[in-house]
Image (cartoon, rainbow, N blue to C red):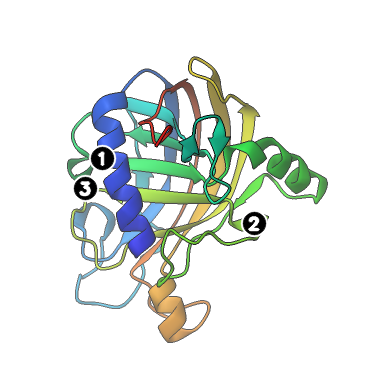
Amino acid sequence: MRWFQHCVTLSTALLLACEGGGEGQLSGTLFVRGCPPFDPTNQSATDVPSPLPDFRLDPHAFFAEVVWGIRTGFTQDVRTGDRLQIRMQRSSNKLDRSDGFELLVHDLRKLESLQRDSLRAGLAGIPIIPPALDQSMSPLPPSPDDAVRAGLVLGHSCRFPLVQPSLRGFVRFTEFGSKVGDTLAGEFEVSVEDLRAKREQGDPPVSPNVAGSLRGWFRIPLRSGPGTAAQ
C-alpha cells in the first residue's frame, strides 16, 4: 500500500531523531502465513490455526511526535494539518529491523472532538480504519471515521510477509497533549485483517494470510517534529 510505504519512510526518519522515554504494551494473537514465529501450520497449506499464536511486543523504544503542517509566516496552509504520530518499538534498531506498532492521527486539532463525538455515539473510542489497498496518503478522506490509521511493522520477526497486516478497531485517549513536554496516553484494540483476501474471497475470507486480535496501551511524552513551517 502506498500509504503504508509512505508512513514507514516517514517513521524511519522520525525514529532516528526522536527515540525516547515512554511506556506501553501490545499483546494478543497474531497469525502471519509463511512467518515461522506466527505460523504453526504447514506453510504451503491454506488453513488458519486455532487457537492463533500468541504475540507480545514488549516495546523498549517510544516516541510521540507532532508533524507540523506547512506554514508561511503565521498562516497555515489550509490543505495541510498538524499530524500526530505515535510509535512503540521493540528495539531501537532501524524500523526495517525491528517490530513496532504505530498510530497516525491526520489532524491533531480534531483529536479531542473526534473522541468526544465517538463516545457520544456509543463507540469505545475513535475508530481506527485501514486505508483501501490502492489508497495513497493524500488526498485525505473527508470522513472523521478515517481520522486514525494504525500499522503493525514486523521488521525483525517477519521482514517479508505475504500480506501486510491491516488493522481495524478503536483508540481511546486518556491524556491529550499538543506541545513539547505534554504527555499522550491511551488504550486501543484492533483486529488484524487481510484486505486482499477479503477483496478476492469475500468477507469473511476463506483463507486469509494474516489474522489476529491485539490490544494495548501507551503513555509517551511529546517531542518536537521535523519542521515544515516557514517555507
- The residue singled out by tag 2 in the image is 145
Marks 3 and 1 in Cβ contact (< 8 Å): no
Residue positioned most to the top: 181
Can residue 142 be seen by looking at this rendering?
A: yes
Tell me which residue sits at (38%, 77%) in the image.
207
Tell me which residue sits at (27%, 66%) in the image.
33
Say what amino acid the circle numbered 1 marks.
Thr
The CA distance from mark 3 to mark 1 is: 17 Å
| Residue 118 horizontal/vertical position (percent) | 74, 47
- Please identify, in this view, whether the residue under mark 2 or under mark 3 is nearer the observer: 2
- The residue singled out by tag 3 in the image is 157
- The residue singled out by tag 1 in the image is 12
The CA distance from mark 2 to mark 3 is: 31 Å
Image quarter of residue 116: top right
| Residue 49 horizontal/vertical position (percent) | 36, 65
Image quarter of residue 141: bottom right
Q: Is residue 117 above or below residue 142?
A: above
Give left or right: position of 176 versus 70.
Answer: right
The CA distance from mark 1 to mark 2 is: 26 Å
SS under mark 1: helix
Tell me which label, 1 or 2, sits earlier in the chain.
Answer: 1
